[in-house]
Amino acid sequence: MRRQFFCSLLLAVLGAAASSQPEQDFSRLEILREPGQPRWLTMYSQLVKWPTHVYPWWFNPAQVPADLDANDVLLAMKTAAARWTQMCNIEFQYMGITNVPPDARLGYLPDGINVWGFSSAYPLAGFASTAVNTHGAITDADILLSAALSWDLEQIKSIMTHEIGHALGLGHSDAPSSIMFAMPYHPFDYTSILRGDDAIGCAALYGESVHAMANRTMNWAEVTYPSILIAHTDPTPYADSIKATPAETVQGHGFIFRYYAHANSYLAVKDGVLYFLGQDNVLHNVGELADLHYIVTASGF
Ligand SMILES: [Zn+2]
């Protein structure tokens, strides 16, 4: 049985000056949209983003599920953040441990401490609360996961990937293929891998990262060829829904590459060419990214 997650984004505290009346705004506005072309949305009536392209965040390990190690949870959160950095020029600056709880009160005032953690204060599985000022700058974004639910690490990576999208300024996309789509929410295994619409939305806010197309192509390959590109398949209570866990992208030897331990194989990109290294230990030229571009984007990546 597939499990879906439920989350929500909320709401602007418009009016940066302390003297102004905070105003809640649930509206979303699509920008630069072609008629009939579903696509990513921003959360507010303007593009909002972290103005310096740096999102500092703290981890609160309180209420981490008892069967999980807090360090593993922290690593899962960093893994989710790295998926966005693959696509756009946003830096996640990990600031350390805090005992400040993640804040999900409606209409809360930003404290500048962006906390990722667990909470029983909100009924949804995941939640991102984001405050912006009148200049379109995100000033505060907390993310909380429900402390009332059981989680495994793959699910935490998945839901964090979606919630981080909110914390970067993205709303729920109109594109059903995107992980930011929420009508209905995608199951956890799907949200392991960013789609093209997510990458384009993030790039519209922060600029496209230098390796965005390489990462989008590798994401496509992982979903298209799961038998040779599954990173690992840890048995979990929800193993039936975790089909693929995308591998980390790392750099070395002039390549950017991903290693798939389950199949002992690699995907790698160098000079605009995608390579596959399998168990035969031969570096196969899959094709040029420019030539693969059409099938990658047409497949939703
Ligand atoms: Zn959402």
Image (spheres, rainbow, N blue to C red):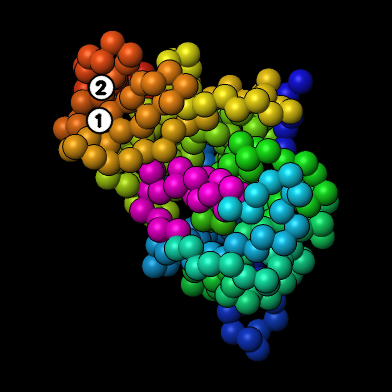
**Kind of residue at badge 2:** Tyr
Horizontal relation, residue 57 to residue 278: left or right: right
Q: Where does label 1 land, which residue?
A: 269
Q: Does residue 41 show up?
A: no
> Which residue occupies 37% across, 29% down?
259
Horizontal relation, residue 96 to residue 11: left or right: left
Q: Where does label 2 land, which residue?
A: 275
> Which residue occupies 49% across, 72% down?
135
Say which of 59 and 6 sits in front: 59
Depicted 15 relative to depicted 128: above or below? below
Region of the chain picked out in magenta, as a range: 72-92
From the image, which quarter does the N terminus lie in? top right
Q: Is there a contact, CB below 8 Å, between mark 1 and mark 2?
A: yes
Residue 100 shown in magenta: no
Answer with the quarter of the image where residue 119 lies.
bottom right
Which element carries disc 1, helix, strand or loop? strand
**Kind of residue at badge 1:** Val
Distance between the alpha carbons at the discs numbered 1 and 2: 6 Å
Residue 80 shown in magenta: yes
Say which of 4 and 107 sits in front: 4
Query: Which circle marks residue 283 in the picture?
Result: none
Q: How many marks?
A: 2
From the image, which quarter does the C terminus lie in? top left
> Which residue occupies 57% across, 24% down?
233
